[in-house]
């Protein structure tokens, strides 16, 4: 079994929700939580996603052949000069990004799913101010949901999760690998012996949470109140009000943390965090891996970033980051970036495309955590990472911080005539 290689379809902001291939405007029952930083956006990594893993752009995208480049170190976007950024969002296999300004405006750019509002080519080389009322090319549709106000959303390659203010979790999309948590993979044999999946088109509550004992017994876990949710390509993590972690979906490479590679059809308790004083405070999901920050500040990892090497089958401490106070972490396809204390740290196996930010004429990849020296002296409030690019909000509250950020090179992408 292998992960579905489709791009991430869901992104969230306090103003809109991108779910699968549709753009959904926020309804009154959405009250999305989001960070409220204030700073300048920095970008590094790939800016022409058609070139990733290829020697040249496909013929059908020939017009974009000379657009974009790999940015090996942090850059400021020229078109965002003077724009104060509050939140930035991307995803483990997303070739597009969004940001929210301190004024509440939405900007977006990158290569988009087939149904988006950027036009027929479905890509834009630089951030554009997105007008949410525009339906010139594609209609905006509402999610068929009428429950308690939704406060958080997350997504994988072909499925989505929404969490309401009461701590209930709902899922919809493709059920393959059991990733919806409804005790089924939805598989059926269609005509000509072709296997298809019975997709859930309406949000459905995830009703069962379990734990498995050492002797193989399956026991229900009551009183699960969800506080956070994170999705990889084909798996999901949940953090509840009792600091417990649950995982389910595709079990390949140990990303579920249960010391085995079997798929889980319903949320299963990750035993390591189910002890007094050893609970989790934050969770993050990469494409084929998972992270959790314990309540004492330790960073734990399980799964794989380099699938050609041995996998970590259950949560283990990331020794390189012991003692660091982490405030933001993000995963790409196989790379990781962390904002901690006064530093920014990243690592990831080859191939990389600049998302680690080490700079020109420097090593392009690293299997161990390294400080991003190109960001020395710059306090990063938040990080985000897409398929092959990284984003950071640099704090510019003082004149000294502003001057330090201004010394970074400026990126001004070429555009089509």
Image: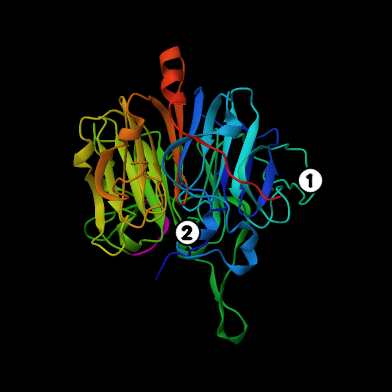
- How many labels sit on residues? 2
- At which x and y percent is residue 286? 40, 50
- At which x and y percent is residue 66? 57, 55
On screen, residue 132 versus residue 32, left or right, reads: right
| Image marks 2 and 1: residues in contact by CB distance under 8 Å | no
Secondary structure mostly seen in magenta is: strand
Which residue is nearer to you in this view: 176 or 181? 176
At a point 55% along the width and 63% down the height, the residue shown is 57
Residue beneath disc 1: 135
Specify the farthest residue to the right. 136
Circle 2 residues within 10 Å: few <14, some 14–19, many ≥20:
some
Marks 2 and 1, how far apart at CA: 30 Å
- At which x and y percent is residue 72? 40, 44
Task: Write down the quadrant of residue 145 in the picture.
Answer: top right
Is 415 in the magenta? no
Asked if residue 207 can be seen in this view, the reply is yes
Q: SS at mark 2?
A: loop
Report the magenta residues as a range: 262-268
Residue 122 versus residue 58 in the image, above or below: above
Which residue is nearer to you in this view: 25 or 76? 76
- Numbered circle sitting on residue 52: 2
Residue 281 versus residue 117 in the image, above or below: above
Is 264 in the magenta? yes
The mark lying in front, picked from 2 and 1, is: 2
Which residue is nearer to you in this view: 371 or 11? 371
At a point 69% along the width and 55% down the height, the residue shown is 115
Q: SS at mark 1?
A: loop
């Amino acid at each position: 079994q292998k992960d579905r290689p489709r791009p991430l379809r869901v992104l969230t902001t306090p103003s809109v929700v991108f779910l699968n291939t549709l753009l959904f405007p926020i309804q009154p029952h959405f009250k999305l939580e989001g960070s409220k930083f204030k700073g300048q956006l920095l970008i590094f990594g790939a800016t022409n996603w058609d070139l990733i893993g290829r020697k040249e752009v496909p013929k059908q995208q020939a017009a974009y052949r000379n657009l974009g480049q790999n940015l090996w170190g942090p850059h400021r976007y020229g078109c965002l000069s003077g724009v104060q950024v509050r939140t930035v969002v991307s995803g483990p296999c997303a070739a597009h990004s969004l940001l929210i300004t301190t004024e509440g405006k939405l900007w977006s750019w990158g290569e988009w799913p087939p149904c988006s509002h950027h036009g027929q080519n479905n890509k834009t080389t630089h951030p554009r101010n997105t007008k949410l009322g525009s339906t010139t090319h594609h209609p905006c549709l509402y999610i068929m949901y009428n429950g308690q106000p939704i406060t958080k959303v997350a997504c994988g390659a072909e499925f989505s999760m929404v969490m309401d203010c009461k701590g209930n979790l709902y899922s919809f999309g493709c059920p393959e690998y059991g990733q919806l948590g409804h005790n089924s993979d939805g598989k059926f044999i269609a005509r000509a012996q072709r296997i298809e999946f019975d997709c859930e088109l309406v949000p459905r509550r995830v009703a069962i949470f379990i734990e498995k004992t050492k002797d193989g017994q399956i026991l229900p876990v009551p009183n699960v109140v969800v506080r956070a949710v994170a999705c990889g390509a084909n798996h999901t993590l949940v953090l509840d009000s009792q600091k417990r972690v649950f995982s389910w979906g595709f079990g390949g490479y140990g990303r579920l943390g249960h010391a085995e590679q079997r798929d889980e059809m319903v949320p299963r308790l990750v035993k390591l965090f189910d002890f007094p004083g050893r609970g989790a405070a934050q969770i993050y999901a990469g494409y084929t891996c998972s992270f959790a920050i314990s309540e004492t500040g330790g960073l734990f990892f399980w799964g794989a970033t380099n699938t050609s090497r041995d996998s970590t089958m259950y949560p283990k401490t990331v020794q390189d980051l012991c003692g660091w106070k982490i405030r933001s972490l993000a995963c790409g396809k196989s790379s990781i970036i962390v904002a901690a204390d006064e530093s920014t740290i990243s690592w990831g196996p080859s191939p990389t495309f600049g998302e680690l930010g080490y700079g020109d004429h420097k090593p392009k990849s690293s299997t161990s955590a390294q400080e991003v020296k190109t960001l020395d002296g710059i306090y990063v409030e938040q990080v985000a990472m897409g398929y092959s690019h990284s984003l950071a909000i640099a704090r510019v509250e003082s004149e000294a911080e502003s001057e330090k950020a201004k010394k970074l090179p400026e990126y001004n992408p070429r555009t089509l005539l």
